[in-house]
Image: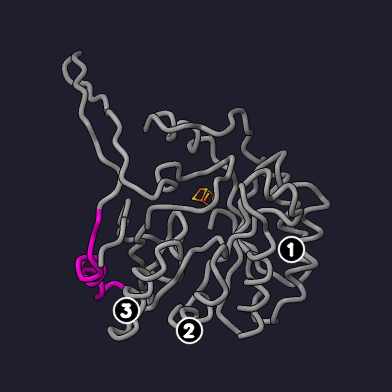
Amino acid sequence: MKGLIFDIKKFALHDGPGIRTTVFLKGCPLNCLWCHNPESRCFDTESYIRVDKLDGKSFNKQKTIGNWMTVEEVIIEIEKDKMFYEESNGGVTFSGGEPFAQYEFLTGLLIVCRKKNIHTTVDTTGYIKREQLNKIHKLVDLFLYDLKHMDDKLHKKYTGVSNKLIIENLKWLSNRKSNIKIRFPVVPGYNDSEKNIDLMRFLLENLYPDVRHIDLLPYHKMAGSKAKRLGLKQQVGGIEEPDARKLGYIRKKFEEIGFTVGIGG
Ligand code: SF4
């Protein structure tokens, strides 16, 4: 079986505990207006022209995003840095796109990692069928779980899908005492309102008490320029990055309900 990978990042320090290898699976069922990984959305390989400059001349090079790999090939890449995982209590993180969208491939990877005693983190939107989550959740050592908006209508407008499954899956995982850290992409003008933060607080403070960490992921303008560079469609322009005062305010709101708060993931 092969899965579609768009990047493998070595020595990642912000995608879970310790030193990690982050494997990015291509394809996402969401379509966030502010997508920070535009090359990850499509469920197929994509081509773009890269312009390199040398001695005042321009050279066009066709590049492909996405690489079909077997479970064994990905595991070989992951195992290259096993020594660093052991030294730092690190491991592998599966990110995307939405890694659960390649459910069978991801299951294959998680089974081998468990056999080889490699710590696994899955960075997810939570948009996964319950039957699949039920089968796979015990193979995951840590979930990095994204919450984007509490208002269902706005969630649909901004991401293309309802938040109902996402919220219900989060509660379900929490009730099973899964190891979960929340991630909140802070996108000014879209999800940083007082009302949204308050609704998030209400949800989070009623989860199982071991879920007590949230990372605020400030929107970065780089997402827009990345899409342009790759010749991909940019959903919206002109989003500002959140300022330090706003991030400090949101941090305080989550600290008030007993959460530790990281900024930047
Ligand atoms: S969930 Fe992530 S990868 Fe998918 S569209 Fe949204 S920002 Fe992009």
Task: State the separation of the CA atoms marked 3 and 1.
Answer: 33 Å
Q: Which residue is mark 3?
A: 113
Percent x, y for residue 125? 55, 60
SS label for mark 3 = helix
The circle drawn on residue 138 is 2
What secondary structure is the stretch in magenta mostly built from?
helix
- Give the mark nearer the N terminus: 3 vs 2: 3
Choose top left, top right, bottom left or bottom right for residue 94: bottom left
The circle drawn on residue 254 is 1
* Type of the residue with mark 3: Cys
Q: Residue at x 55, y 51 (%)?
A: 30
What stretch of residues is rendered in magenta? 68-87
Q: Are marks 1 and 2 in contact (CB under 8 Å)?
A: no
Percent x, y for residue 123? 48, 64
Task: State the separation of the CA atoms marked 3 and 2.
Answer: 12 Å
Q: Is residue 225 left or right of residue 177?
A: left
SS label for mark 2 = helix
SS label for mark 1 = helix
Considering every residue shown, the one lying at the far left of the view is 55
